[in-house]
Image (cartoon, grey):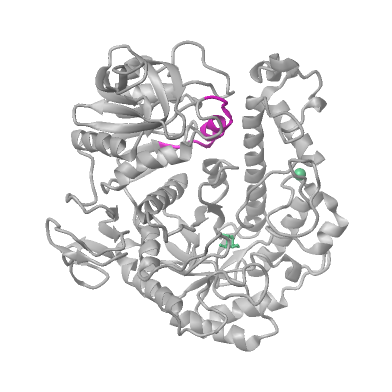
Amino acid sequence: MIPRITGFLHGGDYNPDQWLDRPDILEKDIELMHAAHVNCVSVGIFSWAMLEPEEGKYDFAWLDQVIDRLYKGGIYVILATPSAARPAWMAQHHEEVLRVNTQHLRMHFGERHNHCLTSPYYREKVRQINTALAQRYAAHPAVILWHLGNEFGGECHCPLCQQAFRDWLKEKYTTLENLNQKWWTAFWSHRYTDWAQIEAPSLLTDRSNLAMRVDWQRFMSHQCKTFIAAEREAVQSVSPKLPCTANLMERFWDYDYFSLAESMDIVSWDSYPEWHNEDNIAEAAEFAMNHDLMRSLKKQPFLLMESTPSQVNWKPRNKLKRPGMHLLSSLQAVAHGSDSVQYFQWRKGRGGSEMFHGAVVGHDGTGDTRVFRDVAQVGKTLEKLEKAVYQKPVKAQVCILFDWENRWAIDFAQTGQKGNMRYFDTVNMHYRALWEKGIAVDFCDMRESTDLTGYKLVIAPMLFMLRGGMEEKLRDYVQNGGALVMTYFSGMVDEYDLACLGEAPHGLTDVLGIRATELDALYPGQENGLVTEEGRYGITELCEILQLKGAKVLGTYESDFYAGSPCLTHHTFGKGQSWYLAAKTEQAGLNALYGHIADALEIDKALPDQLPCGVVAAKRGDCVFVQNYTHRAQTLQLTGKWINLLTDVPAEAEIAPFGVWVLQKA
Ligand code: GLA
Ligand code: ZN
């Protein structure tokens, strides 16, 4: 994946430019990196003002020294392009680089991650500095990867972006008439007669046009994608072989990550779970999904680009990681496909808002801290696991559909639990039911190239929008023997966010053997129930009413005027089968459903054994990562003989609180 690299990367964001007046500290860093088993740092992420102190005048002398010193010390460098924050002179002389917010106010200089993605001047300045960096460092033996910008996000409403939006729309719809039709602008007299009348949805403009809002997200996503592509093009025009990444974020909504991933060679992301809650298990389930989603973007191992060695500084309460948690959470990423454990940050700065953010090295400047020892332990562990795990694939027989455009459309839809339909959380609940059983999961979206063949089970929660011919793909998949799970609020609009006419879920009623007729919303605290042969599971938020069209009823509603009517169904279609879940059940309902499905389809699990609640297993290559997310030691009885690669002895019966094992068959 990364030329020359044969093992896990371990290190983090390094800001030597904050310490140039302290050569003693920079010297000490290398020594401490060795002690921490760190082999790689990311440099220059926010260094633009140091690299180009005056417009057109570059100063690379300090960076030459930093990179040479790291190289001599045997530390690899991930070199950043500095586009995530601008020098003050640029904002002073070229206002267009500054974003205009949703109230149409142009921001002033300050903060970061807030440049206009359209500004031709900004794009040109980025191209120039990226090219200069590449010419100087792409061939340096220390440099292994480009880190493009940092955590891209947000939107800009400046005149340049508005015009680019109109151009993008013209390209997509060709004529205004077509746009008016697809946007259903006869509604509220919103018909456009001139392209210039179109303004991006904002607090001051139109938010009633849902199709436009989805298009605006697509457009901003497209701007970001082309921005990243242009950054990559600049550095790779000098040295095509050096791969590029851009660090992504958790639960990220603004841009379509499946699409952005096409502009990079390697996916990386920044993971900041809140491990200190009573319910670490829900947090672990969510972050396992985040990791799997990142792995799925390119169907290859990813890099954990940032995580904290101890605490963050931006939550209302910034708790420490409990003993054991650092190794456990780092290996969770590895188990799900990460080929690195990188931190924000190597060393705490003396000032600025992140001076108290967790770091490998604190203000004491020593390696004699709990955090430092935890980091060194992770480093040593990664060295140990290199042979068995590095670059190894995660093989999944289950695929969950998670689609950004569908997500935007769901969040804009004004019905049901308006503005709070909880798509991400719902997908995570389906995921969690499998994760707890040790079943590996891939994700895919609805792009044309999505291929479902080969999966034993496909799950499509809340598939509200259909695009990319997904209904035909799902039909073929089931027809040819696949197993499909779908839920309420599916197959309702097309890719233009126009309601599908006819019975819902559109194009799939025969595949599912049901027809969805109405969607009911429950008040907070209100419950219905799903009653099956085995028991009763609570229902909150959403209940859809079904009409049977051949499916078999597995469960019915407990109460309300639709009591006794179907809530969970099963249907055979072609050589395959489908389940339809009409309501938002509690987790236990999903656990029971997927328990049956996994058994019926004989889906592979990391371990055949039933593990205690809060202990999960995940498989990568032929290693099984057993993870205890509870505050208690837990007793396990495993079938077969296993060696724990972390201790080189057979797996014991008891796993420590926040303990982790990496097992291989003995
Ligand atoms: C993000 C950023 C970093 C830093 C960390 C703090 O991930 O990329 O620069 O601000 O958050 O947790
Ligand atoms: Zn703009």
Q: Which residues are magenta?
A: 401-415
Q: Where is the C terminus found, in terms of image quarters?
A: bottom left
Q: What residue sits 50% from the left and 83% below the top? A: 32
Q: What residue sits 65% from the left and 52% below the top? A: 233
Q: Is residue 78 left or right of residue 473?
A: right
Position of 55 relative to 189 (above/below): below
- Provide the major secondary structure of the magenta segment: helix
- Give residue 409's position: percent from left, percent from top: 56, 30
Does residue 347 appear anywhere in the picture? yes
Q: What residue sits 62% from the left and 57% below the top? A: 150
Does residue 396 appear anywhere in the picture? no
411 in the magenta segment:
yes
> Farthest residue toward the bottom?
24
> Farthest residue toward the right?
93
Position of 397 relative to 627 (above/below): above
Quadrant position of ligand 1: bottom right
Q: Where is the N terminus found, in terms of image quarters?
A: bottom left
Nearer to the camera, 416 or 34: 416
- Give residue 445's position: percent from left, percent from top: 47, 36
Q: Is residue 438 left or right of residue 249?
A: left
> Farthest residue toward the left?
640
- Give residue 274's position: percent from left, percent from top: 46, 58
User: Residue 103's quadrant in the figure?
Assistant: top right
Nearer to the camera, 135 or 582: 582
Position of 491 relative to 643 (above/below): above
607 in the magenta segment:
no
* Total marks placed: 0
Q: Is residue 349 left or right of residue 479?
A: right
User: Residue 234's quadrant in the figure?
Assistant: bottom right
Q: Is residue 643 left or right of residue 630?
A: left
User: Residue 459's quadrant in the figure?
Assistant: top left
- Give residue 139's position: percent from left, percent from top: 60, 68
